[in-house]
Structure formats: C-alpha cells, structure tokens
Image (tube, rainbow, N blue to C red):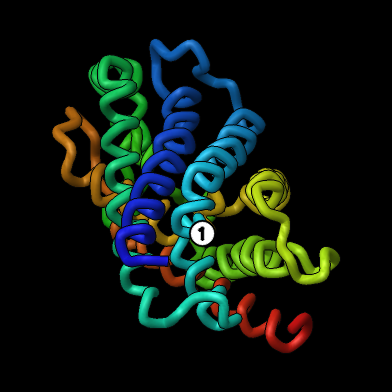
Amino acid sequence: MSSSDIFIGETIGTAVLILLGGGVCAAVTLKRSKAQNAGWLAITFGWGFAVLTGAYLAGGVSGAHLNPAVTIGLAIEGGTKWGDVPLYLGSQLLGAMIGAVLVWLTYYGQFRAHLTDPEILGAQSGEEGLVDKAAAPKAGPVLGIFSTGPEIRHAVQNLVTEIIATVVLVLAILTQGLNNEGNGLGTLGALVTALVVVGIGLSLGGPTGYAINPVRDLGPRIVHALLPLPNKGGSDWGYAWIPVVGPLIGGAIAGGLYNVAFA
C-alpha cells in the first residue's frame, strides 16, 4: 500500500464519514430541517450508515481505518506499519475537517436560521443566567453537530466511558475473520463495523455522545472554532482532550487484548 493510497483513501473516507455523521446531527438539531427532533435512533443509525459508506469507499484503497484509535490498535496488533501511522492520522484529521466544512455548506441556510432565531438565542441567555458563568461549560448551541459533549461532566467517568466504548469498537474490528480461517470478511467487514457502531451508540453513547474516534471530534471542533457562524458560542476546549485521549487509550488496550487473547 503506497503513501498516496493511504492519503487518498483515509482523507476521502473520513470526509464522507464526517459528512454523513455530522449531517445527521445537523438534520436532527437545526431549525428548518425536515428531520428536526428525529431523535437518538436517527443519530445512531445515521452514524452507522456513515461508517458503512466511508469504510466501503476507502476499504480497497487504504484499508479504511478512518479512526486513529483503529490505526493504533492495528499497529499494536501488527497489521499496520508504525512508520505509516503518522500519515494515517494526518490524513484522517484532514478528512474530518473537510467533512465538517461540507456539513456546514450543506446546511448553510439552516445554520443561519437556527443561530439567528430569537427562541434559540433566548434559551441560551436563559441558561447562562441560571448558572455560575465561571463554572459553565463554554459550548455553543450548534457545537453538538460538530463534536461530542457529556451529559454529566465528570472527567474520569467521561474518559472511562470513551475508553470502554472504543475497546469494543477496535476489538470487534481486529477480530473480524477469526472464524473464517483468518481471511477477514472483505467488504462484509464494513457492514459488521457499521452495526457495531450502531450498537455502541445505542448502548454506550448516552453518557458522552460516543466519540470513539479522536479526529471525529477534534477535526470538526477545530472547524466549529474557525467557521463564521453567527452567535455560535464557544467550542468547549476544556473538554476536547477527553474524546481524543480516551479513544487512543481504548485503541491501544484493544490491540494489546487482541495479542494476548486472540493472536
């Protein structure tokens, strides 16, 4: 696999992943969207289909990691060269940022309608008036479209939640094909991974919004900070380390568990 294959596959695959995943969050969140208030089931299945599409597109080019936690797990397992890891991670981050920009372009009118709506602005002002501003998380009204945030802000619990969820994801990827004489599942593996992501969202996503992918959170959060969105509020950088560090730890644990228990 050449460096250009890795770059092209991971950039395009991750961009599509974030376009469709962030897109379902925008569809459910924004005013004047036909899918507004569609709920958690729509989000979890939307992200599952996003993984399926991105992995299918990139699978034959770069192996469709689309996630630094997966790349780290595969490097520890031995399926990916450590020398290729920086290229994978850089391409994934670039793709995630491109995908987030495409979400903004797709929902441009809805973003403006939402962020200039007196009801939304009034709700934000009311919430700020009810809490100590020094203690309040600095998150804007559309940040959840771009990145994750906890329902209960407790750093240790939030970190552990992301680690556990990511171990499930990466271990499920690493063990694909063990019952098929080690030959893998081919394109069927993308479907299995997508269903695992849906399961994680339904079962483990409630506490933190299940980033389970550092660039899925960091890339769009950077874009949120840079985009000219009116009344967008803060990007909650105080929380941003958890959905990066947690999945990386989870991917490393999954790689180690695979080598101990399955290799």
Pick the front one: 130 or 162: 162
Amino acid on which disc 1 is placed: Gly
Q: Is residue 237 above or below residue 87?
A: above
Quadrant of the rendered structure where residue 82 is? bottom left
Numbered disc 1: secondary structure? loop
Are there few (<14), some (14-19), or many (20+) residues within 10 Å of tag 1?
Answer: some
Q: Position of residue 198 (x, y in %)?
A: 67, 44
Q: Is residue 30 above or below residue 78?
A: above
Q: Position of residue 13 (x, y in %)?
A: 43, 46
**Does residue 40 appear to the left or right of 156 in the view shown?**
right
**Does residue 172 appear to the left or right of 233 in the view shown?**
right
The residue located at (53%, 52%) in the rendering is 59
Pick the front one: 11 or 216: 11
Quickly name the residue at label 1.
63
**Is residue 44 visible from the viewing direction of this image?**
yes
Q: Position of residue 16 (x, y in %)?
A: 42, 39
**Is residue 197 visible from the viewing direction of this image?**
no
Q: Position of residue 88 (x, y in %)?
A: 37, 65
The residue located at (34%, 16%) in the rendering is 119
